[in-house]
């Protein structure tokens, strides 16, 4: 049977077809379903929302690690990432703005050599994470739950660098950033995004100018070689491919600071309302939130117990408690909860859940911060651009016996 021996060593999608020699003549292999193209430096199972600009989120079960691996951190680009610099140590960061009398420039090498490095685990979450759930729908990337992650970041304190540059402490109101990405139009004069934080946030211990994620250089898509990282604030404040900081004597008015961008109605509005720019306020602290990362939704159980685990995070010192419910929020039971590695790091919760009889259940998780503010069970505060959805995360479970 020569046709069989010829098929002995065939491969499919890079895998050996183990029983190729036994494949009857005329039978075609089924093949594997097509997979999304993989982003450079990223896990192949990230969900790609767009490729121009690149936006990709992380399925909940891939976020199961206490410290998010670099290849699993979501990507949110507003423009086009710059090319990988040939000599990253020569990358420059300029410090200027109204409050800096004598503008200075530091190379990345100088930042590494002349300042004390610090490492913090900081939760990075896009202000639009969870936008997909808003009704009526909100324009923008339809993020599910995966525009969040919590790697360990290494860099220098923004405060130390501002101190070294010198700035007018009495007049400083805001620190804005500029990066080296390119506007989608290709116009080199158009700024992609230039946001920032109030001076008090900029001066916190954990506010970093970072060059490393989990001890390795940043992935290009996450800002290589240099970026800002602020925990507790919308990730849009954490400028990537960082090239310039401006210490402003007013609220920074860079690209995407005004209008409807990264802003919510100052007072709650009815779903579907149009809101004047003047009535929109800048998002600062992000609300308390949690995510069930294990098991995946849709788990099928052959016994009535289940280990549930995930993360909880907030913009204050720590999440105080996480509870779970299997009866749609009628009653709640406490989860175990770890302390954060540091402020703004996410914390791990876990629980052994017992189901009273076979059937369909949902497990809901609810985090409460130290001020006693808990996640809402239903979608909170509808807003035109669909920011700050911190409704409880839920998974479906089928209990067979
Ligand atoms: N230069 C620059 N910085 C940026 C952005 C960008 O498009 N360009 N996107 C911002 C937004 S909206 C988010 S949510 C975070 C995403 O960070 P990540 O891609 O590393 O996850 O980067 C922020 N910093
Ligand atoms: Mo974002």
Image (cartoon, grey):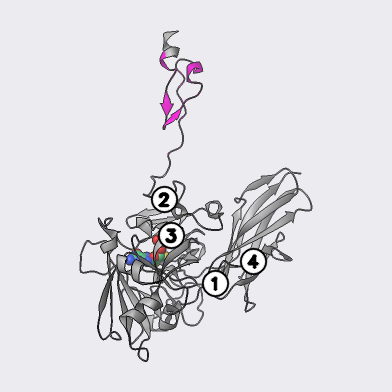
Residue of label 2: 42
Give the residue number, with chain letter if any, for mark 4: 366
The location of residue 289, given as percent across then percent down, is 57, 67
**Alpha carbon distance from label 3 to label 4:** 29 Å
Mark 3 — residue? 213
For the point 47% across and 76% down, which residue is it?
205
Within 8 Å: ligand 1 and the Cβ of disc 1? no
> Of tags 2 and 1, which is closer to the observer?
1
The magenta span reads 6-34
Instruction: Spot the residue most to the bottom.
Output: 170
Tell me the distance, in whole angstroms, between the alpha carbons under discs 2 and 1. 27 Å
Asked if marks 1 and 3 touch (Cβ < 8 Å), the reply is no
Magenta segment's dominant SS is loop
Residue at the location (34% across, 68% down)?
113
> Around disc 2, counting alpha carbons within 10 Å, would you say few (fewer than 14), some (14 to 19), or many (20 or more)?
some
Crowdedness of circle 3 by 10 Å Cα count: few (<14), some, many (20+)? many
| Contact, mark 2 vs mark 3 (Cβ under 8 Å) | no
Residue ranking furthest to the top = 1
């Amino acid at each position: 049977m020569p046709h069989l021996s010829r098929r002995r060593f065939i491969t499919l999608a890079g895998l050996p077809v183990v029983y190729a020699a036994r494949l009857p003549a005329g039978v075609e292999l089924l093949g594997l379903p097509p997979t999304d193209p993989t982003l450079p430096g990223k896990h192949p199972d990230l969900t790609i929302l767009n490729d121009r600009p690149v936006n990709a989120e992380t399925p909940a079960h891939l976020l199961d690690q206490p410290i998010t691996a670099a290849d699993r951190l979501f990507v949110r680009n507003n423009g086009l990432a710059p090319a990988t610099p040939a000599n990253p140590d020569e990358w420059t960061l300029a410090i200027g703005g109204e409050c800096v009398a004598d503008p200075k420039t530091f190379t990345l090498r100088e930042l590494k050599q002349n300042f004390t490095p610090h490492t913090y685990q900081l939760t990075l979450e896009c202000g639009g994470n969870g936008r997909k759930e808003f009704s009526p729908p909100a324009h923008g990337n339809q993020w599910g739950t995966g525009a969040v992650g919590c790697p360990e970041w290494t860099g220098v304190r923004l405060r130390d660098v501002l101190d070294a540059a010198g700035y007018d402490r009495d007049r400083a109101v805001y620190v804005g950033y500029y990066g080296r990405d390119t506007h989608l139009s290709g116009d080199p004069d158009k700024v992609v995004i230039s946001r920032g934080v109030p001076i008090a946030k900029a001066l916190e211990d954990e506010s970093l100018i970072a060059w490393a994620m989990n001890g390795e250089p940043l992935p290009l898509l996450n800002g290589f070689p240099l970026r800002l990282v602020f925990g507790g604030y919308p990730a849009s404040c954490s400028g990537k491919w960082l090239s310039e900081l401006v210490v402003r004597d007013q609220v920074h008015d860079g690209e995407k600071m005004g209008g409807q961008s990264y802003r919510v109605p100052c007072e709650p509005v009815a779903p579907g309302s149009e809101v004047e720019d003047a009535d929109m306020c800048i998002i600062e602290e992000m609300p308390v939130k949690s995510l069930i990362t294990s098991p995946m939704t849709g788990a099928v159980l052959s016994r009535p117990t289940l280990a549930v685990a995930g993360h909880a995070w907030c913009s204050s010192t720590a999440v105080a408690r996480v509870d779970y419910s299997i009866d749609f929020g009628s009653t709640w039971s406490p989860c175990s909860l770890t302390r954060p590695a540091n402020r703004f790091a996410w914390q791990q919760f876990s629980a052994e859940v017992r189901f009273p009889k076979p059937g369909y259940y949902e497990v809901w998780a609810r985090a409460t911060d130290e001020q006693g503010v808990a996640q809402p069970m239903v979608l909170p505060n509808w807003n035109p651009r669909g920011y700050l959805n911190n409704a409880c995360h839920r998974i479906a479970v089928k209990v067979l016996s």
